[in-house]
Image (cartoon, rainbow, N blue to C red):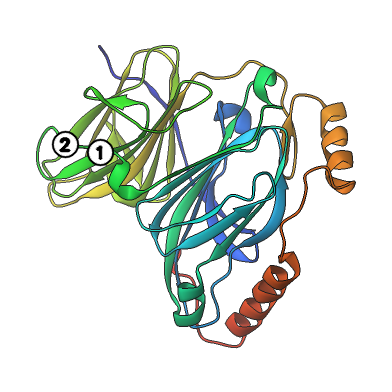
Amino acid sequence: MAPKEVISVSPSRRCIEGGGFVVRRPDLDPRDMSPFLMLDHFGPTCYGPGEAVGAPDHPHRGFETISYILQGCVEHKDSNSGTEGRIGPGDVQWMTAGRGVIHSEMPSPEMLENGGTMEGFQIWVNLPAAVKMCEPRYQDISSACIPETPLQQGAGHVRIIAGTHRNRHAVIETHTAVHFYDVVLESNDAIDVISIPEGQRAFVYCYSQGLMVNGKEVLEGRFACLSSTADQVIISALSSTSSGAALVLGGVPFHEPLAWHGPFVMNTQAEIREAMRDYQRGDFGKIEGAEQRYEQTRQANVRREGSDSSDSLR
């Protein structure tokens, strides 16, 4: 066993997504992140009453989305099977869009009424051509069901969202060999070794303070790309007085053409045009109450513009 080489450490850029919320997104070509397409870190954003925004009804085809919440609460609905639910702190929703769905992700009524802090991640995972048009599927996993292991030394833990760590297996089923771990170091002597098999790329996004990844410094908001050779990702504290937290991702890179337009990720431009036609003629279905969700979002943005509230992205 040996540590993977850290190829690059990239900053994140600020983007506006959904109904008007700010995210941090690693400034990379998606081909350099394969099999992942995108990682968005939203928040921490402090909303006043009536100000919380989400992502009202929008389509997806050809990939998967992972929503992982640290703070706040999100309610979601879809057009495929009428699935709806909510995810709060520590919860995960793994959505396989497949052949196509309309999806809505909105702040919970309590968050909208009372305000509060929202923070979390949405990660897009590509699907191979053979399963891009599979049936949509939702996996809502509560925080209590996500396995955890203690760090090898010191205080902290690893949450196993996808993959296997120290013989503990994630409960989420994936179409491809994908790894997703949340590593939290609560003391300066904490350390852990994550196994990402040789032949798979590994990525580390530091979302709190800073840490060391295979001997390289990765500060908050930075995204490290690691090689597909070797098989270890070693996470340790940045200094003798620090702690930190990071997402560790891994997977087999795709060697297929990539055609991407907004919420559609396919292999050819012809498939993108087909996706747009299918969406425009209503083949993805619809969710009742779309107009109210759009209006709720509009009103929330108006309230935010008129208040002193601001997101606290660093």
Q: Which mark is residue 151?
A: 2
Graded by Cα atoms within 10 Å as few (under 14), some (14 to 19) or many (20 or more), the crowding at tag 2 reads many
Residue drawn at the location 55% of the way across and 26% of the way down: 35
The amino acid type of the residue labelled 2 equals Leu
Could you tell me residue 208's position as x and y percent? 32, 53
Relative placement, left or right, of 270 versus 136 is right
Pick whichever, 201 or 148, lies toward us.
148
SS at circle 1:
strand
The amino acid type of the residue labelled 1 equals Val
SS at circle 2:
loop
Relative placement, left or right, of 40 versus 227 is right
Answer whether labels 1 and 2 touch (C-beta < 8 Å): yes
Could you tell me residue 161's position as x and y percent? 37, 37
Q: Is residue 102 above or below residue 52?
A: above
Q: Which mark is residue 80?
A: none
On the question of residue 293 being in view, the answer is: yes
Quadrant in the picture for residue 229: top left
Pick whichever, 234 or 183, lies toward us.
183
Which of pointers 1 and 2 lies earlier in the amino acid sequence? 2
Residue drawn at the location 43% of the way across and 20% of the way down: 227
Residue occupied by mark 1? 158
Q: Is residue 54 above or below residue 270?
A: below
